Amino acid sequence: MSVTLILIIVAAVAVGCAIAWYLQARQRSSHLKQRFGPEYERAQHDVGDVRRAEAALAAREKRVERLHIRTLERAEADRFAEVWKHIQKLFVDDPKGATNEADHLVNEVMTARGYPVADFNQRAADISVDHPLVVEHYRAARAIAERNTGGTASTEDLRQGLIHYRALFEDLLSERTAEQQATYSRR
């Protein structure tokens, strides 16, 4: 074999590897965009780099795969739904208390589903894997709950907080997967 032929073969293999790497990276990006929806853009904005954002999202996905997330049994879901109805009624007379109760109920549902609830940022990251369309509601509700604790939340803020909690609560009670939710949201 001539040196020229060997160089052509090496160059062809290198180009083939580069194309395969590019296609794999593109497929990974497409998967993460579809799986995480708006959370993909948020992660990219937060870290400022596509590659690092995608690595963080992939790490979240792997972490949640190791958890034992389960759907709720019908009786559990019904019990939680009854508590939610109570919270909504409570809001009329005690908006601050209702917001606190909503926060506790969402944490209880998350625990029942199998999500760890130790640190808020980790909870939000874990929730974003299976519930990417409502994780922003969770963050917004939590911010309002913190203002409520500090005594700076207005009644309108608390009403908005309850709406945000309800979005996450209903999604947690749902049995749809993240892929089904993404499809559902495009309809």
Image: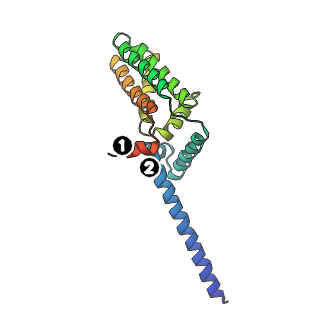
Give the residue type that dot 2 points to: Gln
Which colour scheme appears in the figure?
rainbow
Q: Answer whether residue 37 is visible to the viewer in this image.
A: no
- Residue placed at 44% from the left, 49% from the top? 34
Callout count: 2
- Picture quarter with the N terminus: bottom right
Q: Quadrant of residue 162?
A: top left
Q: Residues within 10 Å of mark 1 (few under 14, many from 20)?
A: few
Tell me if 82 is positioned left or right of 10 in this view: left
- Residue placed at 57% from the left, 28% from the top? 117
Tell me if 134 is positioned left or right of 59 in this view: left
Mark sitting on residue 34: 2
Q: Residues within 10 Å of mark 2 (few under 14, many from 20)?
A: some
- Residue placed at 46% from the left, 31% from the top? 172
Image location (x, y in percent) of residue 161: 39, 24
Q: CA distance from mark 2 to mark 1?
A: 11 Å
